Amino acid sequence: MDQEQAVVAQCPTELFIGGKWRAGEGGRTLAVEDPSTGTTLCEVADASPADGKAALDAAVAAQADWAATPPRERGEILRRTYELMTERADELALLMTLEMGKPVAESKGEIAYAAEFFRWFAEEAVRIEGSYQVAPNGKGRFLVMRQPVGPCLLITPWNFPAAMGARKIGPAVAAGCTMVIKPAAQTPLSMLKLAELMTEAGLPAGVLNVLTTSNSGGVMEPLIRDGRARKLSFTGSTQVGRKLIEQAAEQVLKTSMELGGNAPLLVFADADLDQAVEGAMLAKMRNGGEACTAANRIYVQTAVLDEFSRRLAERMGALTVGRGTDEGVDVGPLIDATQRDKVKELVDDAVELGARVLTGGSVAEGNGYFYPPTVLADVPWEARLQKEEIFGPVAPLTAFDTEDEAVEMANDTEYGLVSYLFTNDLTRALRISERLETGMIGLNQGIVSNPAAPFGGVKQSGLGREGGSVGIDEYLETKYIAINI
């Protein structure tokens, strides 16, 4: 407990604006809660709209000099940040576990994942390319260059408090953009600590500004409508994303949106069942199911449904639930009471409609926002969890018989972020992959996220891509110069 108190005490708790730590207007603060106990870890500054304007002022003031900074220098700052995160992974992981709840081992995995975005984009900073070509009629030349889009507004969620910020900050820094970032009110500490590390790594004042606030809409909407910011990137729910897109339309902001998911996981009878069960565990239980990439609907071909269900229920039922800092814990708490209650509602609704509980299915007693890993069989199509994002450790199983039936069920959603497919038939894998309406596919594996790959969805799962060789494009504009020769 002394170590926990020390790591919290060493974390900044003020706003970070123009390279300085400062209190919020009027000294207002908001409480950061430990979801495993419901107790307060600490208080952080609660930004006002005036604080938000000050942060944007700082980003705008720093933009010209930062854009003119050599790409190699920008890349070296990212590289040093990667190294600092790697060196201090234990401290950063513990801090994340305290504010978000996931087991420390999983937090360490996220720190490594987040740091990798800085290493990847450190290398991309010096690879921003343009082109020079002869006009088709031979009478002129085309010169095409790439330039930073300008000051960016970044909004990140609570479920991956370091990685979702790194996935946006990395390419913005590499491209030469300044930023105002607002982490989720539930998990601000990881971002505040990251700002401290980036300053240590040499990031100039005003390039990264951090706003923690309990009034997200009130603080960020005026900045979106301000006219000086030129880019908005958001990770979160589709419902909020729609509102932000409406606001961004007023100033025609460049936008990238990583929104909700309702991922199907298809298991065919010819699949390796050991591989399929392992993949389902990864796809379902990463981050305790609190992930937009989580397998939300598991469709299994009838011939192997009973065996797959038995194995999955055994694996899920054997997981240990507890405080993320305790040894041997596999699953931590959900983020708050609201999220736990929603998961309970979805399970209760499915059971009332005829679903069978194979394991779990009831709220744990005691402090903290715990919900047990749950497997449901015979889930009817009209159940809410067939349509709504679960964001919890619940695996609903439904049978299918034919390829067409599986694809139809998988695509019957407004979302299109990721799908998972388990089969040993190569031609089937290709056929179905082409038909699935989704931005990413995990083929015989339960994880798709990788800093070196383009992450994003179709339909109402978002706009644009993060990560990979295209991730920096979201932070660059294309300028064309017509040359008379």
Image (spheres, rainbow, N blue to C red):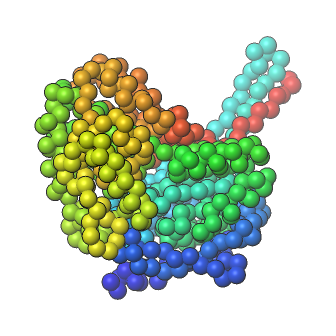
147 horizontally vs 337: left or right: right
167 horizontally vs 384: left or right: right
Q: Which residue is at a point 55% across and 63% down the rendered structure image?
A: 183
Residue 35: percent from the left, percent from the top?
39, 70
Quarter of the image with the N terminus in it = bottom left
390 horizontally vs 416: left or right: left
Q: How many marks?
A: 0
Residue 318: percent from the left, percent from the top?
16, 57
Is 413 in front, or is 483? 413
Residue 290: percent from the left, percent from the top?
39, 54
Residue 164: percent from the left, percent from the top?
50, 55
Residue farthest to the front, as pictured: 352
With respect to residue 29, does 337 lie above or below? above
Residue 154: quadrant of the picture: bottom right
Is 169 in front, or is 131? 169
Is 147 in front, or is 191? 191
Residue farthest to the bottom, as pictured: 2
With respect to residue 46, does 239 lie above or below? above
Residue 8: quadrant of the picture: bottom left
